[in-house]
Image (tube, rainbow, N blue to C red):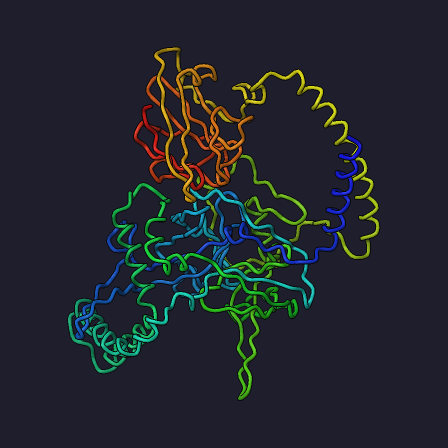
């Protein structure tokens, strides 16, 4: 026992000193999973449609091309578990200096080995700083940590995003010159017919010239993106068939059709350094307020816009935006800009956004819920009012180390007492005593769902296969329901659940199935990776939805069929 205390104390002290002086970057796959790709479309395939238009253009060469008009794409990152995403205004607005967002906003996020599509709503725009916030009501995910302290010049930084250059293939680039001219001709014909339909007459010479230029520009924009347009066309077809009442969908089967399509929704990371922190003129010009920016030299391309600028601990310092290229006869120098995250602090406070900072977690007002609390689209706000935040500095590092060493010593003593008491209690504990009881549960039990009464000995089973080929079989019995007030909790840790689902993507307590007089319901227990029935994710933790024999249950990365045993 003494040796265990020694090892524990050593580990605690080493972790404290390593925390004080991190020696390497801590950018992890979890942080990448908090970065999302945003798709924005400015027109609908039909009134009140979820889908956007896709043009199937027949070229004179005999080839058919999928062309998606009026779209934009970029990066965003999750700032709150309540489904708020921060990005650039020019990602979600057809006119970057306007307050008019695109008509359709979609967000793609990777959850384990699955890819989920969410319908988004723009709740905040500031064209002056080129920032915007999108809300997805079904998105419950781990947010990135925000650091409001000012970074130092020379400090390592990283940007994570979806550079548009990665959407191009060598085959597309090789064929683009051959197809670009015939595509421009067909686009010109389409634009001319649209002009005649709108105005009732052929365009005059000036309008005709503009239409020709527009057709060439559209063909140039398509150039090298044939596969990307095919992916978007498949997405549009999926949305045409999707339930109009849903706001999130599992599109894993679509994404996995080709390896290239998977790369479209896989982020990349680039490293650079902070050059300086300074102020920039407002993008609206004139007397518009200036704002704070972080200049850096991370490699960026179109599509990275709206992504996070992270320090070596993976904490957000800013929102990646535009940059400047200095080109001479023998060199090219790039300077990139990111709007400082401090510019958003006032807005986070004003709307009770539950961000996570390097110093604290800001909790929202208890009565505010993302799906019911309206957030006004606001203009460029005045200078942000800062919340007081205590951050250790170099001048008081010695004091911090001394205090933390004392805390570590107390922690070792406390841990020893805790282990002693735990072992003493464990010797007298009954098997299964660690299972949660209905009285200790934190969820709200619906009054209209009475617990099941003792009846016939029914048996059911959840069956499926994990992405790595592992067979999953979870047996459920009438007796287990009866003995636990009509519910069975599913999760990864057997001591906390009635039925164990052993997979890394499943939370310790992931979901619960309730047996009622009329059948079954299921509810997510605030899991990390979500719960879905037939591909439709539950909207809120502990919200019970119908669950029937024959349904497919999604727990993390697992898809399990609910059958009668």
The extreme bottom residue here reads 329
Q: Please name the residue shown 56% across and 21% down the image.
A: 440
The residue lying toward the viewer, choosing from 355 and 349, is 355
Location of the N terminus by quadrant is top right
Q: Is residue 398 left or right of residue 221?
A: right
Location of the C terminus by quadrant is top left
* 179 versus 490 height, above or below: below
* 188 versus 377 height, above or below: below
Q: Please name the residue shown 74% across and 43% down the image.
A: 11
The residue lying toward the viewer, choosing from 430 and 28, is 430
The residue lying toward the viewer, choosing from 175 and 531, is 175
Q: Please name the residue shown 35% across and 74% down the image.
A: 173
Residue 151 rendering spot, x and y as whole percentages: 67, 62
Residue 190 rendering spot, x and y as whole percentages: 20, 70
Total numbered labels: 0
Residue 129 rendering spot, x and y as whole percentages: 53, 63
* 34 versus 62 height, above or below: above
Q: Is residue 34 left or right of residue 69?
A: right
Classify residue 556 by image quadrant. Answer: top left
Classify residue 395 by image quadrant. Answer: bottom right
Q: Please name the residue shown 26% across and 53% down the image.
A: 237
Classify residue 427 by image quadrant. Answer: top right
The extreme top residue here reads 454
Residue 437 rendering spot, x and y as whole percentages: 54, 19
* 274 versus 479 height, above or below: below
């Amino acid at each position: 026992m003494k040796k265990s205390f020694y090892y524990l104390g050593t580990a605690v002290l080493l972790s404290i000193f390593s925390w004080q002086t991190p020696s390497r970057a801590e950018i992890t796959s979890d942080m990448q999973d908090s970065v999302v790709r945003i798709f924005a479309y400015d027109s609908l395939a039909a009134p009140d449609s979820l889908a956007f238009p896709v043009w199937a253009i027949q070229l004179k060469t005999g080839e058919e091309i999928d062309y998606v008009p009026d779209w934009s794409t970029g990066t965003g990152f999750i700032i709150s578990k309540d489904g708020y995403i921060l990005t650039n205004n020019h990602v979600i607005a057809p006119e970057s200096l306007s307050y008019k967002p695109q008509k359709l906003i979609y967000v793609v996020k990777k959850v384990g080995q699955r890819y989920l599509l969410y319908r988004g709503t723009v709740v905040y725009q500031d064209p002056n700083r080129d920032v915007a916030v999108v809300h997805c009501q079904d998105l419950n995910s781990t947010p990135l940590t925000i650091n409001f302290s000012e970074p130092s010049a020379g400090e390592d930084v990283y940007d994570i995003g979806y550079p548009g250059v990665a959407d191009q293939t060598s085959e597309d680039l090789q064929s683009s010159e051959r197809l670009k001219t015939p595509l421009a001709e067909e686009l010109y014909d389409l634009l001319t017919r649209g002009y005649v339909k709108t105005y009732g007459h052929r365009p005059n010479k000036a309008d005709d010239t503009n239409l020709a230029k527009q057709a060439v520009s559209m063909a140039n924009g398509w150039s090298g993106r044939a596969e990307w347009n095919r992916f978007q066309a498949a997405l549009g077809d999926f949305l045409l068939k999707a339930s109009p009442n849903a706001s999130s969908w599992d599109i894993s089967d679509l994404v996995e059709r080709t390896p290239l399509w998977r790369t479209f929704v896989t982020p990349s990371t680039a490293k650079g350094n902070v050059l300086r922190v300074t102020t920039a003129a407002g993008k609206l010009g004139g007397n518009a307020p200036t704002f704070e920016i972080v200049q850096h030299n991370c490699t960026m391309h179109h599509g990275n816009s709206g992504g996070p600028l992270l320090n070596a601990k993976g904490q957000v310092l800013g929102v990646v935006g535009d940059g400047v290229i200095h080109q001479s006869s023998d060199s090219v120098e790039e300077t990139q800009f990111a709007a400082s995250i401090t510019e958003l602090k006032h807005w986070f406070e004003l709307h009770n956004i539950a961000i996570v900072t390097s110093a604290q977690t800001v909790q929202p007002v208890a009565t505010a819920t993302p799906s019911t609390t309206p957030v006004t689209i606001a203009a460029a706000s005045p200078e942000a009012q800062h919340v007081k935040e205590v951050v250790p500095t170099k001048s008081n590092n010695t004091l911090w180390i001394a205090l933390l060493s004392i805390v570590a010593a107390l922690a070792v003593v406390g841990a020893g007492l805790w282990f002693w008491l735990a072992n003493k209690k464990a010797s007298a504990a009954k098997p299964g005593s660690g299972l949660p009881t209905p009285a200790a549960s934190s969820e709200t039990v619906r009054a209209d769902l009475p617990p099941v009464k003792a009846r016939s000995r029914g048996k059911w089973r959840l069956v499926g296969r994990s992405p790595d080929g592992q067979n999953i079989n979870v047996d459920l019995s009438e007796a287990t329901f009866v003995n636990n007030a009509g519910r069975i909790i599913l999760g990864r840790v057997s001591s906390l659940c009635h039925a164990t689902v052993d997979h890394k993507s499943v939370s310790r307590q992931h979901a619960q199935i309730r047996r009622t007089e009329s059948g079954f319901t299921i509810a997510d227990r605030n899991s990390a990776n979500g719960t879905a029935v037939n591909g439709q994710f539950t909207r809120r933790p502990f919200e019970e939805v119908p669950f029937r024999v024959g349904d497919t249950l999604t727990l993390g990365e697992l898809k399990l069929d609910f059958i009668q045993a």
